[in-house]
Image (spheres, rainbow, N blue to C red):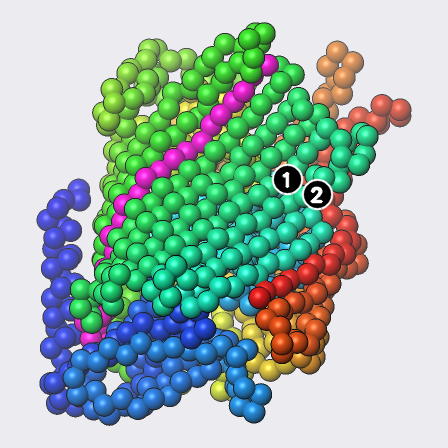
Amino acid sequence: MITKKNIVFFILLLSSLASFSQETNLNGITKKFTLSGIITDAGSNETLIGVNIIMPELKTGVTTNEYGFYSITLPQGIYAVQISYLGYQNIEESINLNQNIKNNFKLFSNETALKEVIITDNKTKTDIRKPEMSVNKLSISTIKKMPVVLGEVDVLKSILLLPGVTNAGEGASGFNVRGGGADQNLILLDEATIFNSSHVFGFFSVFNPDAIKDLKLYKGGIPARFGGRASSVLDIYQKDGSSKEFHVNGGIGLISSRILVEGPLVKDKGSFLIGGRSSYAHLFLKLSEEQKNNSAYFYDLNTKLSYKLNPNNNLYLSGYFGRDVFSLNKSFTNIYGNSTLNLRWNHLFSDKLFSNLSLIYSDYYYGLDLDFVGFKWDSGIQNYNIKYDFKNYISDSFKLNYGVNAIYYNFNPGTIKPSDSNSGINFDQLDKKYAFEPALYINADHEISDKISLSYGIRYSMFYRLGQSTINIYENDNPVTFNPDLQIYEKATPIGPKFYGKNKAIESFNNLEPRFSFAYQINDDQSVKASYNRMVQYLQLISNTSSPTPLDVWTPSDNFIKPQIADQVALGYFKNFKDGMYSLEVETYYKKVKNRLDYIDGANLIANKAIEQVILNGQLRSYGLEVMFRKNEGKFNGWISYTLSKSEQQTPGRTAIETGINNGAWYNSVYDKLHNIAITSSYNLNEKWSFGANFALQTGQPVTYPNGQYEYLGINVPSYGLRNENRLPAYHHLDIAATLTPRKNIDRNWEGEWVFSIYNLYNRKNAASINFRQNTDTGSNEAVKTSIFGIVPAVSYNFKF
C-alpha cells in the first residue's frame, strides 16, 4: 500500500542526490557560478523554446524551457558560449564566469540577415547526448511546407508522417500512437486539455498554425510532469505575440481563411495576440436548390496576453474557443467544440529556481438539436486544473523538476429537453458525474559522466469518483452476465440503487508512476538509449468506433470501470552522419495496457444510463520497430520513416464457462497497422520557388466482415465471425505542393506567397469503410466501398505585414 512515508522517502532520496551532485567539484575547482537568462526573438521579443546553449570546452550545455529560460552552473572560468536554434543565426560569445551572470540573448531570424552575410542554417540533427527518446519535434515552418488536403495547413496531419503514428483513415479524427487508441493521447494547448482535436469530423485540426509556436510529441520516455493518458502526450504552445511592433498575417484558401494580429500592449513589456479562422464552404451549398438548407462549417479563436511585471515575474492569459456546426434541412443541427482558458504566472526565485503557476479551465461541449423528433440533447465535460511546477537547475549535471496539480471534473453524459412546447419529449437529465484527480511528481535529469546521462522520476496520482450520483447495485457486484446456453454476454438486472451525496467518494484509486530514461554516448556521433514509463489513465472514452466522434462520451473510472495502466519499455540507436547532415533513429518498443475497455456484442452506448452493463475489461499490447532517416540541411531535405508494428487486444472470460471476446484469444485491435511508411521532402529551388511532397502507405485497418447470412421474415440478415479478422484495402496517397514567393517590394511591408497543391495526385480511392448490403434489383449481396477523397487540387494565398 502506498503511504505518505513512501513519497517523503522518495523526495528525500532525490534531494540527497541533488546535494551530492552540487557538492561534486570539477578538476578540483570548488567555486562555481551560474549563467542564466531568457532567450527571445530579436524582432518580436517572443520567447524561444528549446534553444541550445553549449559550452564546447566542457562538452556540456542546456536548453531553454517552455518560457525561454535557461540556467547552467559551471566552475569559474572563461568560456565560449555557442547559442543555436533552427531558423535563427548562431551566436558565439566569450563569457568570463567569475560571478553569477544574467544574460538575456536575442536571436535574429535568418530571414532578417543582410544579403552580404552568409548564413548556415542550424541543423535539426538528433541529440545524441540527452536521455530523451521517443520524442518528435516539428517546427511550424516545416509543417507549413507539407502539402495537405484542400490546401489547409494542419498540425495533426503532419504528425501522421512520423514513425509510430497512424490514423483510422481519411476523414477520421484523432491519431493513434504505437498501437494505442486516440483517447489515450493527452493533447495540450498552452497546458489546457483539448478533448476533441478535430474540425469537420476529422478533416481538419483545431490548431491554427499561425498561432502555434512549438510542438512536441512524446511517444515514450514521458516526463513525470505529464499524466492522465496511457499512450502519448502532444504538447503545443501558442505564440506570445510581438511586444515590439504590430504584425498581421493570415491566409485565404478554397474553403477557409485565417487572420492573426499581434502587437505590443506596452512596448517591450506587454503583448497581445488574437487569431481567427473560419470555413465558408457551406456558403456554396446555398447556390444549390437541393442543398440550400444544409450547412457545415467551423470557426475558432486563439487569444493570448503577455506582460512582464519585472525581470523575475511574467503573466500570461491565453485562451481558445472553437465550434463546428452541421445542419441538415434545419431539422438536424449538431454543434460541438472546445473552450480553454489559462492564467499563468512565471516567477524566478533565483538564477537556479524557475516556477510556473497555472490556473486552467477546459470545456468540451456537444449539442444535438433534432427538430423532426422535437428534442435537444446537450453533453460535455468540464475540468478545472491548478498546477504549480518548479525547475531547479542545481548544477550543470543535475536538474530537478517537481510540482503538484489537481483537476476537478464535471461530466454531463446528457441533458434531454423538448425543443418546443408541442414536443412529446419530456425533460431528462442523465446523472452527472464528478471526479477529482490530484497528483505530485519529481523528476531528475542527471549526467553521470561524459558518456552516461539519466532521467528518472516518479509521479504519484490519485483519483476520486465523487457523488452526487445514484449507482446501481448488482448481484455479486457484476453488471454483465454470461448466458452459457446462447454463449453471449447479457446485461445484468440491478438489485437496487445506492445514492451518494455531493462530494461523497464512490471509489478511489492511487498509483505510483515511475519514469526512467538512459543514454550512453558511444562517441560524438552515436548513442544508445533506453526508457521505461508507467502511465495511468483515469478517464475513459465510451466509444466502439475506430476513431473518436463528437458523439462519444467521456466517463470517469469508478467501481465498475477501472483505470487503464500502461507500461512501456523502449530501446533505441541514434546516429548522426557527416556532421549532422544526415541522422538515423531506430527504436523498438513493447507496451502493455491493463483494463482496456471492450464491449459486449450489440452494445448500445448512446445515452446509456447504465454503461457498466455493456462493458468488459480487457487488455491491450503493442510492439514494434521504428526507423527514421532524415536529411537535415541543404536545398533538399526531409525524412523517410518506417514502422513495423503489431497491436492486439484480449478480453478473456472471467470464469471457466465464459468465452470472452474471440474465445479469449488475442485479436487485432482496430489500431493495428503492420506496415506504415511515410516520406516527406522539401526542395528550395531559389528565392521564389519551393516544392514539397508527401507519400504515405499503411496496412489496411482491421474490420469485421460478415461470413454468412440467414433469412428472417424474407430479409437476408448477415452473420459475423470473429472480431477484426478482416482488413480494409491498403491505404496510400501521394501529395505535392509548390510555393511561389514573389520578390518583396522594399518600399512595402507586405509579404505574400501562393501555395499550389494537389492532394492524392494519382486519385487513389482509399476505403473509409466497406458496407455489405442486398441489391434491391438483383437480390444478391454486394460490398460497397465508401471513399472520402479522390484527387484534390487547391490553391491558397498567405500574407503578412
Relative image position of residue 579 (x, y in whole percent): 49, 87
SS of the residue at dot 2? loop
Q: Quadrant of residue 458?
A: bottom left
Quarter of the figure that contains the N terminus: top left
Mark found first going from the N terminus, 1 or 2? 2
Residue located 57% across and 43% down the image = 299
Q: Is residue 443 left or right of residue 197?
A: left
User: The disc labelled 1 sits on which kind of residue?
Assistant: Tyr
Relative image position of residue 748 (x, y in whole percent): 62, 72
Q: Gap in Å between the C-alphas at discs 1 and 2?
A: 7 Å
User: The disc labelled 2 sits on which kind of residue?
Assistant: Ala
SS of the residue at dot 1? strand
Q: Is residue 76 magenta?
A: no
- Above or below, 642 against 96 in this view is above
* Magenta residues, dominant SS class: strand
Look at mark 2 in the image and give the residue it sits on. 281
Residue located 41% across and 53% down the image = 304
Q: Residue furthest front?
A: 747
Relative image position of residue 97 (x, y in whole percent): 21, 87
Highlighted magenta segment, given as a residue range? 374-400
Instruction: Residue 297: give its label.
Output: 1
